Image (cartoon, rainbow, N blue to C red):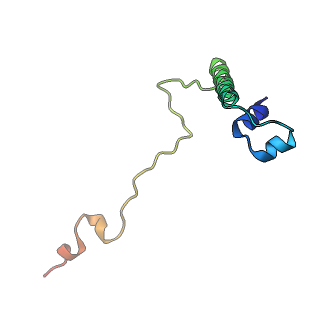
Amino acid sequence: MVEVLWRIIDRKPEYLEKHFLAPPKASEVVKAVDTLVKLDIAILKADMDLGIFDRKLGTLDLKVHRATPLRRTGPRSSGRHPARGASR
């Protein structure tokens, strides 16, 4: 069903020739887009009802790796600028 809707929406000449379809009217394209969007929304609602997108607030995901600041090494690790720290 989704493929047929996409053929109506996309309406490439090779689709029309291969499947012996007449070019769709503008109203048919609008109805196909409307039907496809409603189908996607219905699938999303079903997924949400099943709890696929549930996230428990206040819990941490241990798989998330946060960036930790790198330690400075070398002449700047003391906090002094190398040119200013040199004796004159």
User: Residue at coordinates 68% horizontally, 28% vertically from top-left?
Assistant: 36
Q: Nearer the viewer, residue 85 or 5?
A: 5
Where is residue 33, by image quadrant? top right
**The C terminus lies in which quarter of the figure?**
bottom left
As drawn, the residue found furthest toward the bottom would be 88
**The N terminus lies in which quarter of the figure?**
top right
User: Residue at coordinates 70% horizontally, 31% vertically from top-left?
Assistant: 25
Q: Nearer the viewer, residue 20 or 10?
A: 20
Q: Is residue 83 left or right of residue 21?
A: left
User: Residue at coordinates 15% horizontally, 79% vertically from top-left?
Assistant: 87
Q: Residue 61: image x %, image y %?
A: 53, 34
Q: Nearer the viewer, residue 55 or 1?
A: 1
Q: Residue 21: image x %, image y %?
A: 82, 36
Where is residue 51, by image quadrant? top right
Where is residue 11, by image quadrant? top right
Q: Residue 31: image x %, image y %?
A: 67, 25
Label tally: 0
